[in-house]
Image (tube, grey):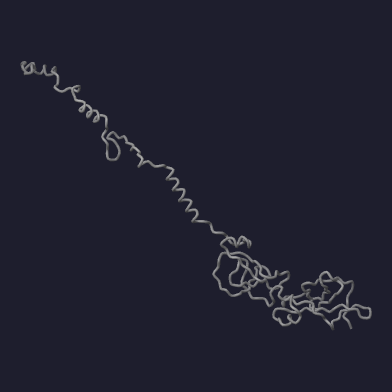
Amino acid sequence: MNACFRAPLFLTLITLTACPLPTKLGNLSDSDATTLEETTATPATATDGETTDGTTLEPELTSTTKFDPSETTAIGTASATSASSDTETPVACEGLDQATCEAVDCVSHFGTAFDFPGCPSGQVYLGCSEPQDCDEAEHPFCKDGTDEVYLLPSGCHPSGFSLCEAPGIALCDTCEALTEAECLEEPAGCQPIYGAPHVEVEGEVCADYENKEFLRCIANGGACPPFVPVVCEVGDTDKRWDSPSGCVPAGFEECATPEFVPGCQ
Protein backbone atom coordinates (compact mmCIF):
# COMPACT_ATOMS: atom_id res chain seq x y z
CA MET A 1 0.00 0.00 0.00
CA ASN A 2 1.12 3.50 -0.76
CA ALA A 3 2.64 5.25 2.17
CA CYS A 4 0.58 8.37 1.59
CA PHE A 5 -2.56 6.54 2.61
CA ARG A 6 -1.11 5.12 5.91
CA ALA A 7 -0.71 8.56 7.47
CA PRO A 8 -3.26 9.94 9.89
CA LEU A 9 -6.22 11.85 8.51
CA PHE A 10 -5.08 15.27 9.73
CA LEU A 11 -1.88 14.81 7.80
CA THR A 12 -3.60 13.59 4.66
CA LEU A 13 -4.35 17.02 3.22
CA ILE A 14 -0.80 18.20 3.77
CA THR A 15 0.64 15.06 2.31
CA LEU A 16 -1.54 15.20 -0.76
CA THR A 17 -0.02 18.46 -1.81
CA ALA A 18 3.44 16.93 -1.66
CA CYS A 19 2.67 13.64 -3.35
CA PRO A 20 3.45 13.48 -7.07
CA LEU A 21 0.59 13.06 -9.47
CA PRO A 22 0.46 9.71 -11.12
CA THR A 23 0.64 11.27 -14.50
CA LYS A 24 3.17 14.02 -15.36
CA LEU A 25 3.68 15.88 -18.64
CA GLY A 26 7.12 14.37 -18.85
CA ASN A 27 5.67 10.88 -18.62
CA LEU A 28 3.47 11.29 -21.70
CA SER A 29 4.26 9.05 -24.61
CA ASP A 30 5.59 10.52 -27.89
CA SER A 31 2.23 10.05 -29.63
CA ASP A 32 0.37 11.77 -26.82
CA ALA A 33 2.82 14.66 -26.84
CA THR A 34 2.48 15.06 -30.57
CA THR A 35 -1.30 15.11 -30.37
CA LEU A 36 -1.22 17.71 -27.62
CA GLU A 37 1.24 19.87 -29.56
CA GLU A 38 -0.90 19.80 -32.72
CA THR A 39 -4.00 20.61 -30.76
CA THR A 40 -2.29 23.54 -29.12
CA ALA A 41 -0.51 24.88 -32.27
CA THR A 42 -3.30 24.44 -34.85
CA PRO A 43 -6.10 26.96 -34.50
CA ALA A 44 -9.64 25.88 -35.13
CA THR A 45 -10.82 26.74 -38.63
CA ALA A 46 -14.23 28.26 -39.34
CA THR A 47 -16.23 27.35 -42.40
CA ASP A 48 -15.75 30.84 -43.95
CA GLY A 49 -11.96 30.50 -44.07
CA GLU A 50 -11.43 32.39 -40.81
CA THR A 51 -9.99 31.07 -37.57
CA THR A 52 -11.67 31.45 -34.24
CA ASP A 53 -9.22 34.24 -33.44
CA GLY A 54 -10.35 36.30 -36.48
CA THR A 55 -7.40 35.70 -38.79
CA THR A 56 -7.93 34.67 -42.42
CA LEU A 57 -6.32 31.64 -43.90
CA GLU A 58 -4.97 32.04 -47.43
CA PRO A 59 -5.66 28.94 -49.56
CA GLU A 60 -2.60 27.34 -51.04
CA LEU A 61 -2.45 27.64 -54.83
CA THR A 62 -1.90 24.39 -56.62
CA SER A 63 -1.24 23.59 -60.25
CA THR A 64 -5.00 23.26 -60.77
CA THR A 65 -6.05 26.45 -58.93
CA LYS A 66 -3.35 28.90 -60.02
CA PHE A 67 -4.21 31.38 -62.82
CA ASP A 68 -2.43 34.18 -64.63
CA PRO A 69 -4.12 37.61 -64.13
CA SER A 70 -2.99 38.52 -67.66
CA GLU A 71 -5.39 35.91 -69.01
CA THR A 72 -8.35 37.94 -67.74
CA THR A 73 -6.87 41.12 -69.27
CA ALA A 74 -6.31 39.40 -72.60
CA ILE A 75 -9.92 38.18 -72.73
CA GLY A 76 -11.22 41.67 -71.94
CA THR A 77 -9.02 43.23 -74.60
CA ALA A 78 -10.16 40.74 -77.24
CA SER A 79 -13.81 41.43 -76.39
CA ALA A 80 -13.25 45.19 -76.63
CA THR A 81 -11.52 44.81 -79.99
CA SER A 82 -14.37 42.67 -81.32
CA ALA A 83 -16.97 45.16 -80.11
CA SER A 84 -15.06 48.04 -81.70
CA SER A 85 -14.94 46.30 -85.09
CA ASP A 86 -18.70 45.69 -84.97
CA THR A 87 -19.53 49.39 -84.45
CA GLU A 88 -17.65 51.16 -87.25
CA THR A 89 -18.61 54.78 -87.97
CA PRO A 90 -20.67 55.09 -91.20
CA VAL A 91 -19.02 56.94 -94.07
CA ALA A 92 -20.49 60.37 -94.94
CA CYS A 93 -21.14 60.18 -98.70
CA GLU A 94 -22.13 63.78 -99.41
CA GLY A 95 -19.37 65.85 -101.00
CA LEU A 96 -17.12 62.93 -101.98
CA ASP A 97 -15.38 62.97 -105.36
CA GLN A 98 -16.12 60.24 -107.88
CA ALA A 99 -13.12 58.02 -107.08
CA THR A 100 -13.73 58.11 -103.31
CA CYS A 101 -17.48 57.64 -103.70
CA GLU A 102 -16.99 54.50 -105.77
CA ALA A 103 -14.43 53.13 -103.30
CA VAL A 104 -16.82 53.19 -100.32
CA ASP A 105 -20.39 52.08 -99.74
CA CYS A 106 -21.94 55.10 -101.48
CA VAL A 107 -23.75 55.81 -104.78
CA SER A 108 -22.36 57.96 -107.63
CA HIS A 109 -24.86 60.01 -109.63
CA PHE A 110 -24.48 60.93 -113.32
CA GLY A 111 -26.58 63.04 -115.65
CA THR A 112 -26.62 64.60 -119.12
CA ALA A 113 -26.82 68.37 -119.26
CA PHE A 114 -29.48 70.18 -121.22
CA ASP A 115 -27.86 72.78 -123.41
CA PHE A 116 -26.62 75.95 -121.69
CA PRO A 117 -23.57 78.15 -122.39
CA GLY A 118 -20.46 76.15 -121.58
CA CYS A 119 -22.41 72.97 -120.84
CA PRO A 120 -20.42 69.74 -120.51
CA SER A 121 -21.20 67.04 -123.03
CA GLY A 122 -21.93 63.40 -122.31
CA GLN A 123 -22.40 61.82 -118.89
CA VAL A 124 -21.40 64.17 -116.09
CA TYR A 125 -20.61 63.20 -112.47
CA LEU A 126 -22.99 65.22 -110.30
CA GLY A 127 -22.33 63.99 -106.78
CA CYS A 128 -22.39 61.22 -104.20
CA SER A 129 -25.05 60.06 -101.76
CA GLU A 130 -26.13 57.21 -99.53
CA PRO A 131 -28.13 54.44 -101.27
CA GLN A 132 -31.68 55.57 -102.11
CA ASP A 133 -34.96 53.84 -102.87
CA CYS A 134 -36.37 55.50 -106.01
CA ASP A 135 -38.00 54.78 -109.39
CA GLU A 136 -36.09 53.89 -112.55
CA ALA A 137 -37.64 56.48 -114.92
CA GLU A 138 -35.66 59.39 -116.37
CA HIS A 139 -36.19 62.74 -114.64
CA PRO A 140 -34.85 66.28 -115.17
CA PHE A 141 -33.18 67.84 -112.14
CA CYS A 142 -32.24 71.49 -111.72
CA LYS A 143 -29.00 72.37 -109.97
CA ASP A 144 -30.05 74.56 -107.07
CA GLY A 145 -29.27 78.25 -107.51
CA THR A 146 -28.33 77.94 -111.21
CA ASP A 147 -29.93 77.68 -114.67
CA GLU A 148 -28.34 74.27 -115.21
CA VAL A 149 -30.64 71.32 -115.84
CA TYR A 150 -29.57 67.67 -116.09
CA LEU A 151 -31.38 64.55 -117.20
CA LEU A 152 -30.84 61.72 -114.71
CA PRO A 153 -31.61 58.04 -115.44
CA SER A 154 -33.76 57.65 -112.32
CA GLY A 155 -35.34 59.53 -109.45
CA CYS A 156 -32.17 59.10 -107.36
CA HIS A 157 -30.10 62.27 -107.11
CA PRO A 158 -27.39 63.89 -104.98
CA SER A 159 -27.96 66.80 -102.63
CA GLY A 160 -28.04 70.22 -104.28
CA PHE A 161 -30.42 69.11 -107.06
CA SER A 162 -34.22 69.38 -107.22
CA LEU A 163 -36.78 67.75 -109.49
CA CYS A 164 -38.01 70.27 -112.08
CA GLU A 165 -39.63 70.65 -115.51
CA ALA A 166 -37.54 69.77 -118.53
CA PRO A 167 -36.56 72.86 -120.55
CA GLY A 168 -37.65 73.00 -124.17
CA ILE A 169 -34.11 72.57 -125.45
CA ALA A 170 -31.92 69.70 -126.55
CA LEU A 171 -29.27 68.01 -124.50
CA CYS A 172 -25.80 69.55 -124.54
CA ASP A 173 -23.89 69.12 -127.82
CA THR A 174 -26.62 67.06 -129.43
CA CYS A 175 -27.55 69.85 -131.91
CA GLU A 176 -24.15 71.26 -132.86
CA ALA A 177 -23.13 68.18 -134.85
CA LEU A 178 -26.33 68.12 -136.92
CA THR A 179 -26.53 69.20 -140.54
CA GLU A 180 -29.06 71.78 -141.67
CA ALA A 181 -31.53 69.11 -142.75
CA GLU A 182 -31.12 67.14 -139.53
CA CYS A 183 -31.50 70.29 -137.49
CA LEU A 184 -34.75 71.17 -139.23
CA GLU A 185 -36.11 67.73 -138.36
CA GLU A 186 -35.67 68.44 -134.66
CA PRO A 187 -37.80 71.57 -134.16
CA ALA A 188 -38.55 70.73 -130.51
CA GLY A 189 -34.91 70.56 -129.45
CA CYS A 190 -32.73 72.29 -132.04
CA GLN A 191 -32.80 75.30 -134.29
CA PRO A 192 -30.63 76.35 -137.25
CA ILE A 193 -28.68 79.59 -137.13
CA TYR A 194 -28.24 81.51 -140.37
CA GLY A 195 -25.94 84.36 -141.26
CA ALA A 196 -26.00 87.03 -143.98
CA PRO A 197 -22.56 86.82 -145.61
CA HIS A 198 -20.53 89.95 -146.15
CA VAL A 199 -19.95 90.28 -149.86
CA GLU A 200 -18.49 92.91 -152.12
CA VAL A 201 -20.86 94.51 -154.63
CA GLU A 202 -19.54 97.19 -156.97
CA GLY A 203 -16.57 97.74 -154.70
CA GLU A 204 -18.67 98.04 -151.55
CA VAL A 205 -19.02 95.47 -148.73
CA CYS A 206 -22.58 94.61 -147.79
CA ALA A 207 -24.50 91.90 -145.97
CA ASP A 208 -26.44 89.67 -148.36
CA TYR A 209 -29.71 88.96 -146.53
CA GLU A 210 -31.21 87.46 -149.66
CA ASN A 211 -28.77 84.56 -149.62
CA LYS A 212 -28.29 83.69 -145.97
CA GLU A 213 -26.07 80.72 -145.17
CA PHE A 214 -26.46 77.96 -142.59
CA LEU A 215 -23.92 78.50 -139.84
CA ARG A 216 -24.66 75.99 -137.09
CA CYS A 217 -27.44 74.06 -135.42
CA ILE A 218 -27.92 75.03 -131.76
CA ALA A 219 -30.20 73.96 -128.94
CA ASN A 220 -33.62 75.52 -129.13
CA GLY A 221 -34.42 77.82 -126.24
CA GLY A 222 -32.84 80.71 -124.46
CA ALA A 223 -32.84 84.28 -125.61
CA CYS A 224 -30.06 85.62 -127.82
CA PRO A 225 -28.93 89.25 -127.57
CA PRO A 226 -31.39 91.73 -129.17
CA PHE A 227 -28.88 93.04 -131.70
CA VAL A 228 -27.23 91.76 -134.86
CA PRO A 229 -23.63 90.77 -134.19
CA VAL A 230 -21.01 90.28 -136.90
CA VAL A 231 -19.59 86.79 -136.49
CA CYS A 232 -16.79 84.73 -137.97
CA GLU A 233 -15.44 81.29 -137.37
CA VAL A 234 -12.97 81.10 -134.49
CA GLY A 235 -9.48 81.83 -135.81
CA ASP A 236 -10.68 82.94 -139.27
CA THR A 237 -11.67 86.59 -139.68
CA ASP A 238 -11.53 86.69 -143.47
CA LYS A 239 -15.16 85.63 -143.91
CA ARG A 240 -17.88 87.35 -141.88
CA TRP A 241 -21.63 87.17 -141.41
CA ASP A 242 -24.35 89.22 -139.88
CA SER A 243 -26.25 87.04 -137.41
CA PRO A 244 -29.83 88.37 -137.52
CA SER A 245 -30.95 86.02 -134.72
CA GLY A 246 -28.51 87.73 -132.37
CA CYS A 247 -26.97 84.32 -131.52
CA VAL A 248 -23.26 83.51 -131.68
CA PRO A 249 -23.25 79.74 -132.24
CA ALA A 250 -20.57 77.39 -130.94
CA GLY A 251 -17.42 77.58 -133.08
CA PHE A 252 -18.05 81.24 -133.92
CA GLU A 253 -17.08 84.51 -132.29
CA GLU A 254 -17.88 88.17 -132.71
CA CYS A 255 -15.62 89.93 -135.19
CA ALA A 256 -14.69 93.59 -134.91
CA THR A 257 -15.53 95.59 -137.99
CA PRO A 258 -14.19 99.07 -138.71
CA GLU A 259 -17.48 100.42 -139.95
CA PHE A 260 -21.16 99.64 -140.29
CA VAL A 261 -21.94 97.12 -143.06
CA PRO A 262 -25.28 97.81 -144.79
CA GLY A 263 -27.49 95.22 -146.34
CA CYS A 264 -27.03 94.56 -150.02
CA GLN A 265 -29.57 96.21 -152.37
Give residue 258's position: percent from left, percent from top. 89, 71
Residue positioned 76% across, 75% down in the render: 224
Give residue 84's position: percent from left, percent from top. 49, 53
User: In the image as oriented, which residue stretches furthest toward the front?
Assistant: 63
Indicate whether 205 appears above or below 70.
below
Give residue 28's position: percent from left, percent from top. 19, 24
Residue 8 versus residue 154: which sits nearer the camera?
154
Indicate whether 57 appears above or below 216.
above
Residue 153 versus residue 258: which sits nearer the camera?
153
* Among the 4 quarters of the image, the one containing residue 130: bottom right
Residue positioned 14% across, 19% down in the render: 20
**In which quadrant of the rendered image does the N terminus lie?**
top left
Left or right, 59 with respect to 134, comes to: left
Left or right, 173 with respect to 156, comes to: right
Residue positioned 46% across, 50% down in the render: 78
Give residue 64's position: percent from left, percent from top. 35, 42
**In which quadrant of the rendered image does the C terminus lie?**
bottom right
* Among the 4 quarters of the image, the one containing residue 204: bottom right
The number of callouts visible is 0
Left or right, 55 with respect to 103, comes to: left
Residue positioned 25% across, 30% down in the render: 38
Left or right, 65 with respect to 123, comes to: left
* Among the 4 quarters of the image, the one containing residue 42: top left
User: In the image as oriented, which residue stretches furthest toward the right?
Assistant: 203
